[in-house]
Amino acid sequence: MRWQTVRQFLWGEIPSSKLERRLLLKLDWFILSYCCLMYFTNYLDRANVNNAYVSGMKEELDMQGNDFNKINTIFTCGYIVGMIPNNLMLQVVPPRLWFPSMQIVWGVLTFCSSSVQNVQQLYAIRFFQGISEASTFVGTHYILGSWYKPGELGKRSGIFTSSGLAGTLFSGVLQAAVYQHLGGVGGRSGWRWLFIIDGIITLPIALYGFLVFPDVPSTTKVFYLSEEERVLSQNRLDSDVVHHSLSWDLAKRVLSRWRWYGCSLLFAISGETESFGSNNLMGQWLSAIGGYTVEQVDYYPSGVTAFGIASTLVCATWTDYTRARWPVLVYMCFCCTVAAICILVWNTPTGLKFFAYYFAGAAYSGQATTFAWANQICADDYQERAIVLASMNMWNNAVNAWWPLLFYPATDAPRFKKGMIAMICTCAATLGVTWLVWYLERREHRLAERKAMEDVDQMRQESASPTEKDKPLKGE
């Protein structure tokens, strides 16, 4: 009994049969392996731009002022444009074709990044990379929600999110190694080689996706699932799902419920707690104060990502076991508030600032939990779930398009005073919206339970009362 409890805590809900256990093992191996590798290269590409900036790209492309922030903003604009179309394409084109195709597109564009001669060329490449990379994050959360039960979903979402963070972590190590060993080889700077290696890593993973990705339970034809396993994959999730054909009724369903509004607002705000890591504030701080080598500036911020991975996996494990998602957001907000205060009070030891930046890595733990929560809330409607998940990321990126320019411009390094104040306010707002979503979800469950009880009572009354044909006629 004790071993089962430990197993459930570590890996989620225990399968009810040997067949389901075998199915889950295959899903974990093939779905998670491809999705994690795909997201790893996705985040490797994003992080490489940050690391290239502090490793010679800034000087070689003569980047001035907020050019670095503009690169990220233009990428975000492309990401926003591609968000909902990419997710709707998964309803039309098999995911086993769409995901790898988009990965090939951004892999080729990554190669192109190694040859840019000015920042304007990089602007154009990053916009189209944003469109293609928009397929990955939300699309994968949609796929995970299509295959996994609520009690299995948090951990898998956490592993998937951590793979992206691992890409960020690996990028710093890779950039330092490239800078040391490939800088100047073939007449190319180290940061240019970084993009070439990134592209070389990306393309074989896309080919792997063409071979093994299973689409969704209702359409899968992959070689490694038996017919019995295909049927089980649908039946174990379909009991409470309402199926709809794709029509304009979808807009009515989405806009008439609280789910789209609540979940979109939650991630639009809470996603900005990741600003410390996504804008590489620690790397900019180290570069601005001086006294650190290029390799150290690349290596040291990896601690932010490492703490983010640890927080994500621990929190995802805990939420699957307890089925409570909101405490993770409280934890995240606490860590980020403490970190912002430590940096805001500038006359503190350098060691405390190191601690603060690393502690802020906890912000990444909210990402997997928030999307697992949305998958859970919208589990009864596949199409609404696809729109809600895409909209969450879309609205977050809509905010993120201008947020760094306003609160974290590169010219504010090393203190980022406005950014620290913004982080404290963001955490307070996140706590408020978290409570709102928690309340609305509980209210929806109470109303559903009340309606179910009323339906049962009505059925009992109808079965207990005699029908007209059973009533005795007058005079008998």
Image (cartoon, helix red, strand yellow):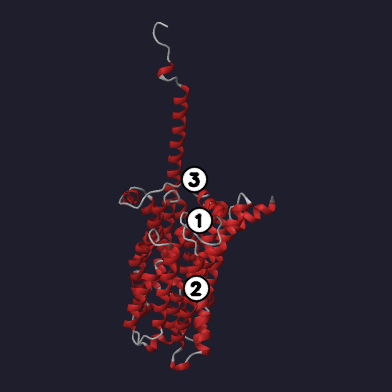
Per the image, label 1 sits on a secondary structure element best described as helix
Residue drawn at x 35%, y 87% as measured from the top left? 117
Marks counted in the figure total 3
Inspect the image, locate mark 1, and give the three-letter code of the amino acid beneath it.
Trp
Percent x, y of residue 349: 52, 77
Residue 205 got which mark? Answer: 2
Inspect the image, locate mark 2, and give the three-letter code of the amino acid beneath it.
Ile
Q: Nearer the viewer, residue 121 or 204?
A: 204
Q: Quadrant of residue 266?
A: bottom left
Eyeballing the image, is 447 above or below 96?
above
Q: Residues at badges 3 and 2 in contact (C-beta under 8 Å)? A: no
Q: Nearer the viewer, residue 353 or 361?
A: 361
Evaluate whether residue 205 shows in this view: yes
Residue 147 got which mark? Answer: 1
**Gap between marks 3 and 1, in whole Å?**
13 Å
The crowd level at tag 1 (other Cα within 10 Å; few <14, some 14-19, many 20+) is: many
Q: Residues at badges 2 and 1 in contact (C-beta under 8 Å)? A: no
Percent x, y of residue 2: 69, 52
Name the residue carrying label 3: 239
Evaluate whether residue 280 shows in this view: no
**Gap between marks 3 and 2, in whole Å?**
35 Å
N-terminal label among 3 and 2: 2
Percent x, y of residue 225: 55, 58
Eyeballing the image, is 35 above or below 465?
below
Percent x, y of residue 399: 35, 65
Q: Nearer the viewer, residue 130 or 35?
A: 35
